[in-house]
Image (cartoon, rainbow, N blue to C red):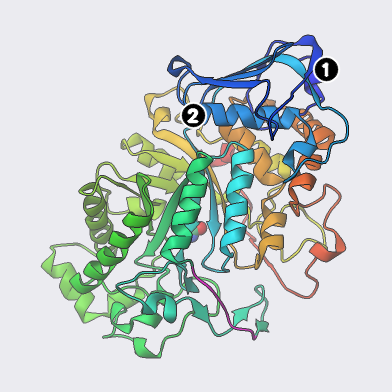
Amino acid sequence: MDDSYGETGCVASELNVIPAPSRVELTGGSGPFSGNVRTDVDPSLGPEAYRLTVSADGAGIVGGDEAGVFWGRQTLRQMLGPEAFRRAPTAREPVTVPYVIVEDRPRFAWRGFMLDVARHFLPKDDVLRYVDLLAAHKLNVLHLHLTDDQGWRVEIRRHPRLTETGAWRRRTRLGWGTPPLWDERPHGGFYTQDDLREIVAYAAERHVTVVPEIDLPGHSQAAIAAYPELGNTDVVDTAALEVWTDWGITRNVLAPTDAVVRFYEDVLDEVLAVFPGRFVHIGGDECAKDQWRESPTAQARIRELGLENEDDLQSWMIRHFAHWLAARGRRLIGWDEILEGGLADGAAVMCWRWYAGGIAAAQAGHSVVMCPQQEVYLDHVQAHGPDEPVPFGWVHTLEDVYRFEPVPPRLAGTPYAANIIGAQANLWTEVAENRGRVDYQAFPRLVAFAEVAWSRLPGPDERDFGDFERRMNAAHYARLDALGVGYRPPTGPHPWQQRPGIPGRMHNKPRKTWRMAT
Ligand code: ACM
């Protein structure tokens, strides 16, 4: 690679670079992408691919489609230097870029980031900002976890109490200590349907698809607090339930009745009208079955449907929504628990528990997005050390994330590998209560993840993390500074990023590596 190009420290690109030892000033227009920057589309390049040429004439970006043009612009923006990441120009000197030909295309079609806006609400402006941050790193899916026990964040006009009641909780547990510590301030918020339409449209302009998640039948206590008839009223006084103030897995789950299914069809009808993307996420994770075991209504349902047990009852519910969505031209995606008891054809799986579910789903012909918590859960702590804020989970360093391999070795080289449609990094927000905490957890690790999801890197052991680190230090931290991202500095948290006194909870089981797990 040519030195002048190397200095630009591009990330999240698989660059086939033909250098020439000269530079050109990009000129004219109101921004960096007009004047002597030309764009074109040539479908023969393939989806999302691009060719970027910089020569004495200026820059040319040919995309396989409009998305490819857009990703090419992001690479050119990186070559323009950190100033190009500010909201208005500040450079006093003309900016020049080296002559190059870059040919680039993504490894995976789904390059995702999940933001949990249920545990802590993130205001709309912060979500829009995350769309910009994803786009700058060529990530193309924003998965919004919109509902959970601790909050319901999407306006549903037919069932207004979902947000009137379900969007607010009385107080919030601070971290994970015993005895519990509480922040006694009420917490909440929700997006109107127009807020979400705005986010969807803003994302579409940046070739990012927003995937909504309505989690069922577990992780639903906020909905039950709003509409007690959604819960298992024959085993618990659901009218006494509140939006949950604690963390973990609650026993309070949806009742497996036709009325509940109809209610969620109403919800999804409105969700489909707001989110035009193909995939709709219905959760399906961590559904405690205690109440179904105790509930005469649930047991009668199992008998009536000719099912074996409570796991099959969950499977019946998920299959119902898989068919319901398919009939409306959409595809269901859910956490890997939805495999238990069998899954409808066409449904896709998001694999978060090790790799086994993803391998089984891919072998059964389902599309799979790999996001194992052992590798790419960005709520997990990113370094050892006493100053890390609210340490949770396993330590996933920047290097660990850079060495994440989405295709398990058992599938590599088999036809099933093609069923791994992508990878995703997930950020749950029990201990990330605002934009600053989210930034700290996400960055810089999301940059490493973006490069893994886009590029064809060598296997984990052969990856040149030193080179990635060099590009981060030479250029990319300065871009994140220009963007105003509150990332974790390589030397550890700034004093204002620490959370002294708020206890975390580290996983005490050893973190298996993907090599052991596959
Ligand atoms: C999950 O982390 N419960 C999907």
Give the residue number, with chain letter if any, for mark 2.
Answer: 66
Q: Main secondary structure of the magenta part?
A: loop
In this view, 227 is above or below 514: below
Tell whether 321 sits left or right of 131. Answer: left
Tell whether 439 sits left or right of 64. Answer: right
- Other-residue count near label 2 (Cα within 10 Å), few / some / many at <14 / 14–19 / ≥20: many
Residue 196 at x, y = what percent?
A: 46, 58
Residue 295 at x, y = what percent?
A: 26, 80
Q: Residue at coordinates 69% horizontally, 45% vertically from top-left? A: 445
In this view, 303 is above or below 452: below
Label 2: state its secondary structure: helix
Residue type at mark 2 is Glu
Based on the displayed image, in which of its 4 quarters is residue 229 positioned? bottom left
Q: Residue at coordinates 51% horizontally, 41% vertically from top-left? A: 205
In which quadrant is the N terminus drawn?
top right
Label 1: state its secondary structure: helix
Residue type at mark 1 is Asp
The magenta region covers 184-190
- Which residue is nearer to you in this view: 254 or 356? 254
Tell whether 114 sits left or right of 336. Answer: right
Q: Which mark is residue 3?
A: 1
The answer to whether one can see residue 477 in this image is yes
- Other-residue count near label 1 (Cα within 10 Å), few / some / many at <14 / 14–19 / ≥20: few
Reading the chain from its start, which is encountered first: label 2 or label 1?
Answer: 1
